[in-house]
Image: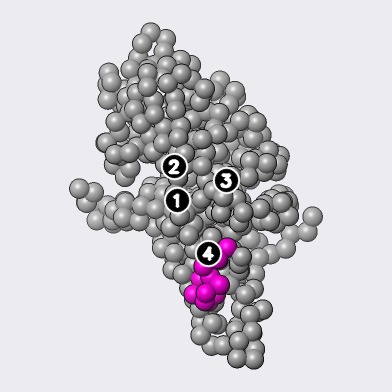
Amino acid sequence: MTFEPLGSDFFGYENLLRPEEKAALARIRDYLESDVRPVVNGCWERAEFPTEIIKPLGALGAYSFGWEETRPFENSAVFRGFVALELARVDASVATFVGVQNGLAAGSIAACGSATQRAHWLPRLASGDIVGAFALTEPLSGSDSAQGLRTTATRDGDSWVLNGAKRWIGNATFSDITIVWAKDTADGAVKGFIVPTDTAGYTATKIEGKISLRSVQNADITLENVRVSEQNRLQEANSFRDTARVLRFTRAEVSWAAVGLAMGAYEAAAAYAAERVQFGKPIGGHQLVQDLLVKSLGNITASLGMVVRVSQMLDEGTQRDEHSALAKSYTTSRMRETVAWCRELFGGNGIVLDYDIARFFSDAEAIYSYEGTQEMNTLIVGRSITGLAAFV
């Protein structure tokens, strides 16, 4: 399969990829264009997730590239970023599903699980045979999860008993396992648990009425005396620092998804500018429309350069929290600006799903907010600059 460079990658960052990485990316891109793009607007409108794509994406390696136990070939963090970008430039809801399945659920087990846990769970998640979710955020705890976690875990012999509530948990209405983070009542430390969703006392209820990422099945979760065996406790998760290791990885990939979403909006706008005729010629021939397109491409190009470097630092072992926080803060801000310009170019047609841009415009709001809000990521970087914490 021939790898065709994206016109929206104006400086050609894809040329950093090795031939086998380009080939794998081309296979994913082809599947997304042929099987995913045609169904996503309908799913978004109905607030449904296209579950039929889960196993094909697994067969393409979308959930497995990052983990030693499952990766089909040696690959770079830049390549894995481009996978997130490809998903988001077609549909941010699908990108979010993969981010939860691979980055958060599998990522928690890869980073904090024992060798036995990794060998048991990662291949099943990588193939799409099971679906994973990640439950950290709570009704009363979001940005302050490090200190404000209210869900509790109490040791009882060879088991743990979990009680509490979680909110905004992606994939949770149909997940087979959920990674639940809870505070140990004995020592106050945050610990992680692999919770099969058919466990007694575990309930997931879909959150209705969303205006963003409508295809993502977010849920409220209640945990009422949910009993989990010690063997399902993540053996290397002993404090919130371990949770943060997972989030550092996923925050960088959300930055890539932000670039991908902006690319999708820009590509839709550029195509529309070429076909929409007003005043006797395509609107792309008007100066103000070209200005919107050029500003959008500038944002995309600058953001892509940033996320490429952050992923290179991950491969080098030099990436720190403030690096991924700056990437997430900057790229999502530029994404939000870009999709607004692109929606503007469509005029009234920009508020209907027919042209994709309305979906990109709405979905940008969720990408802007999750995996650390703009404000929290700013404070992480600000602490690095000044040496002073300004969180409270």
Distance between the alpha carbons at the discs numbered 1 and 2: 8 Å
Q: Amino acid at mark 4?
A: Ala
Foreground residue among 251 and 270: 270
Mark earlier in primary sequence (3, 4): 3
In-image side of 289 versus 320 (left or right): right
Query: Circle 4 sits on which residue?
Result: 358
Query: Circle 2 sits on which residue?
Result: 207
Distance between the alpha carbons at the discs numbered 3 and 4: 17 Å
Across and down, in percent, residue 305 comes to 51, 63
Distance between the alpha carbons at the discs numbered 2 and 3: 12 Å
Distance between the alpha carbons at the discs numbered 2 and 4: 21 Å
Mark earlier in primary sequence (2, 4): 2
Element type at marker 4? helix
Mark earlier in primary sequence (1, 3): 3
Is 363 placed above or below 296 here?
Answer: above
Write down the region rendered in magenta. Answer: 343-353
